[in-house]
Amino acid sequence: MSRAGAGAVRHGVYAPPAPDRVLTARSADGSPLHVEVHGPTDAPAVVLAHGWTCSTAFWAAQIRALAGECRVIAYDQRGHGRTAAAEVCSTDALADDLEAVLAATLAPGERAVLAGHSMGGMTLMAGAGRPGLREHAAAVLLCSTGASQLVADSRVVPIRAGRLRTGLTRRVLGSGAPLGPVTPLAKKVLRYATMGPGAAPDKVEACARIVHACPRDVRQAWSHVLAELELGVRVRELAMPTAVVCGSADRLTPPVHARRLAAVLPDCRSLDVLTGVGHMTPIEAPAFITEKIRALVAEHLAAPAAVDAEERAV
């Protein structure tokens, strides 16, 4: 069984649906990327980029809800899910991988709504100035993410902000210790660090299975990249309409990050802070995230027939 298959729940809204098509995209350094396509080939396109320690399974609820009306494209970041680890881990590599996925799945000039969670949002920011993203991104959704100061602002270690907390947080998030099996204690720890206090058991279970399936060397390698993250300049290049969502109880990327992004994005259309929700917004608030994506599709990916009719009326 693949890592992604082993790391996902089998039943319910968080069980990953079978893709209509699977393909391999090749990044700039030759790294192969696992890509899934769900939904009609002629439907408006949505591209989903998951976060650190996750996989395409993380977007199961959104894929289920949208695949009947959209062409939903989801891919595994390098080292995650069904994509093998690569020697290079960097924000430039994330941007390269995104460009490769867009080139492999979208026709020249075709536009899509791009949604990224956590490291997936950082991927979109890293690629903001890239030709591939500028060609294909009609609108962007940034979920539970930040551009810099991730370790200093994290609230995973429950002490006052300062040098001690920053140092302890760096050690905790960068630990190479194995996570082990998904036990009741492991789920308690995961919920404390990554989810809101009221997260339902099925949501915690889904997140735990996905995160625990990530190899520890991959988890550790990417933690070092995130600890040194500095994408503030690139955020200002994300010129397309952008919506920002975060959870009020997010310990990994607290709302201060979302507010900073909203303040500097060239075209921020909305900022939503979801009360009581933690870091895992697409799983904790699946309907809300789905509706944000659906609204961006409706506003920025008008059907060609509708556009033609409007032009003729003018």
Image (cartoon, rainbow, N blue to C red):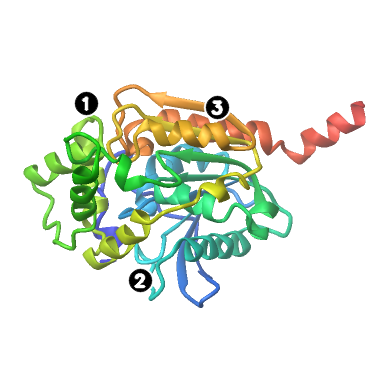
For the residue marked with disc 2, what is the amino acid?
Ala
Q: Position of residue 187 (x, y in %)?
A: 14, 42
Q: Position of residue 68 (x, y in %)?
A: 53, 40
Q: Position of residue 114 (x, y in %)?
A: 56, 46
What crowding class fits label 1: few (fewer than 14 Cα within 10 Å), some (14-19), or many (20 or more)?
A: few
Q: Nearer the viewer, residue 139 or 260?
A: 260
Quarter of the image where the C terminus is located: top right
Front position among marks 2 and 3: 3
Quarter of the image where the N terminus is located: bottom left
Q: Are the two marked residues, 3 and 1, in contact with CB atoms closer than 8 angstroms?
A: no
Q: Residue at x 42, y 36 (%)?
A: 257
**Element type where label 1 sits in the image:** loop
Going from N to C along the chain, the mark reached first, 2 or 3, is 2
Q: Position of residue 30 (x, y in %)?
A: 51, 77
Q: Provide the residue designation for mark 1.
A: 198
Q: Which mark is residue 16?
A: none
Q: Provide the residue designation for mark 2.
A: 85
Going from N to C along the chain, the mark reached first, 3 or 1, is 1
Q: Provide the residue designation for mark 3.
A: 270
For the residue marked with disc 1, what is the amino acid?
Gly
- Marks 2 and 1 sit apart, C-alpha to C-alpha, by 34 Å
Apparent side of residue 131 relative to residue 176 in the rendered image (left or right): right
Q: Residue at x 22, y 36 (%)?
A: 202
Residue 215: image quadrant is: bottom left
Q: Are the two marked residues, 2 and 3, in contact with CB atoms closer than 8 angstroms?
A: no
